[in-house]
Image (cartoon, rainbow, N blue to C red):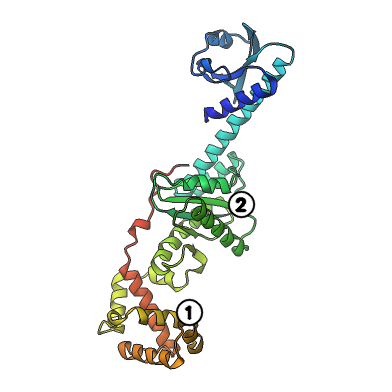
């Protein structure tokens, strides 16, 4: 429980009532007080207060009230005892302290619980039971976003994301490491994929604007119960890993839209190397220059349409045909034929997969903090 909240409350009471007020713990340590000289000191009357059976008592011009949390005294609030309204103000302070304590404990417990769920530290049976104890909706729709930024002591991704999603009892922002933040977002439906992607873009744009930092975001699929939140997290991690290999020009990766890249990523690397050796016996890939790679990419982007590709490349149709003939001589594949185009497309993805070492993207659950 952050004591600055107590101090803020004390100052608010002073501003409204004109009376000095504060909070101390059962050891008598003054946690907050509008009397600056008292903050951090130990109250000389703590023993007298605790030994008394009274919940409220007045001592030397100050009124004190015990605050019970789960049937135990945890705090004592105090205020100047000047008139009949002082005790009413005191009761309100005690109620606020109790509510603050309950809110922060509830929030902390829920966040800790979600960490355990995400990283597989609790069983399905325990998840169901714990969600009931914490009064969490077990079957609500949730989805996991993974946000990755460059490591920097001056970057506070967590705070920016938390400010976008202030409902801390339904949405959870977890810090995985110095570069990675997780958002577990409750959503209304598992059908609103456009809304989810728009949400991810809002996060991305906010980070780019407010932090001026390069950020990458991935998202898993929507799950309909707390136990499956871990699956959405694993999907988001997979999407980030695969996206950084096969779609380097993008900054947002959706697990539901990974396509053939996900299949290639699951293949053993020795098998991938064997495939390239069989398709390109003379290392034809090594002869591809920037112009050739751009031509191939644009041709694929335009669904093998020669007219549209030549228009976007600002070249004559015959020039494009010449380049395609050149590629055919180099590889033995005619990209104007669908089957040959598929082979080259897969080959290029396989080559990208083999050239990338993505071990640094595999996160470890240790040192996870809220």
Reply above or below: 246 against 335. above
Q: Secondary structure at mark 1?
A: helix
Q: Work out whether residue 191 or residue 249 is closer to the camera in this orientation and state it.
A: 249
* Among numbered discs 2 and 1, the one appearing first in the sequence: 2
Q: Work out whether residue 212 or residue 158 is closer to the camera in this orientation and state it.
A: 212
Residue at 43 percent of width and 93 percent of height: 318
Residue 84 pos. (x, y %): 74, 13
> Is 86 placed left or right of 196 in the picture?
right
Q: Please name the residue that numbered disc 2 is placed on.
A: 139
Circle 2 crowding by C-alpha within 10 Å: few under 14, some 14–19, many from 20: some
Circle 1 crowding by C-alpha within 10 Å: few under 14, some 14–19, many from 20: few
Reply above or below: 232 against 68. below
Residue 219 pos. (x, y %): 51, 59
Q: Please name the residue that numbered disc 1 is placed on.
A: 301
Reply above or below: 91 against 322. above
Is label 2 or label 1 in front?
1
Residue 170 pos. (x, y %): 60, 46
Residue at 56 percent of width and 62 percent of height: 197
């Amino acid at each position: 429980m952050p004591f600055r909240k107590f101090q803020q409350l004390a100052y608010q009471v002073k501003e409204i009532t004109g009376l000095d007020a504060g909070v101390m713990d059962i050891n008598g340590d003054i946690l907050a007080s509008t009397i600056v000289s008292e903050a951090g000191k130990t109250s000389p009357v703590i023993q007298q207060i605790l030994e008394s059976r009274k919940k409220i008592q007045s001592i030397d011009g100050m009124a004190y009230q015990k605050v019970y949390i789960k049937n135990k005294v945890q705090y004592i609030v105090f205020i100047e005892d000047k008139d009949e309204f002082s005790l009413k103000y005191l009761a309100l302070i005690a109620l606020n302290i109790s509510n603050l304590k309950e809110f922060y404990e509830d929030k902390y417990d829920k966040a800790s619980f979600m960490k355990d769920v995400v990283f597989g530290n609790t069983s399905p049976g325990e998840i169901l039971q714990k969600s009931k104890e914490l009064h969490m909706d077990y079957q609500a729709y949730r989805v996991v976003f993974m946000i990755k930024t460059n490591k920097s002591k001056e970057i506070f991704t967590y705070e920016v994301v938390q400010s976008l999603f202030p409902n801390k009892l339904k949405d959870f922002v977890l810090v995985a490491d110095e570069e990675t933040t997780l958002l577990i977002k409750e959503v209304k439906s598992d059908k609103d994929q456009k809304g989810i992607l728009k949400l991810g873009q809002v996060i991305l744009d906010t980070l780019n604007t407010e932090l001026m930092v390069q950020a990458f975001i991935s998202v898993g699929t929507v799950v309909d119960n707390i136990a499956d939140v871990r699956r959405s997290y694993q999907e988001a991690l997979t999407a980030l890993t695969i996206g950084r290999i096969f779609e380097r020009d993008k900054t947002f990766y959706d697990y539901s839209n990974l396509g053939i890249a996900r299949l290639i990523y699951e293949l053993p690397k020795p098998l991938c190397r064997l495939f390239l050796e069989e398709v390109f016996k003379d290392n034809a890939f090594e002869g591809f220059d920037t112009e050739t790679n751009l031509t191939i990419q644009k041709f694929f982007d335009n669904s093998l349409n020669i007219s549209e590709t030549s228009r976007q490349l600002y070249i004559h149709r015959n020039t494009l045909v010449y380049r395609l003939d050149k590629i055919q001589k180099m590889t033995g594949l005619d990209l104007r034929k669908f089957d040959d185009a598929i082979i080259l497309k897969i080959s290029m993805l396989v080559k990208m997969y083999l050239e990338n070492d993505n071990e640094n993207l595999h996160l470890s659950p240790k040192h996870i903090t809220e």
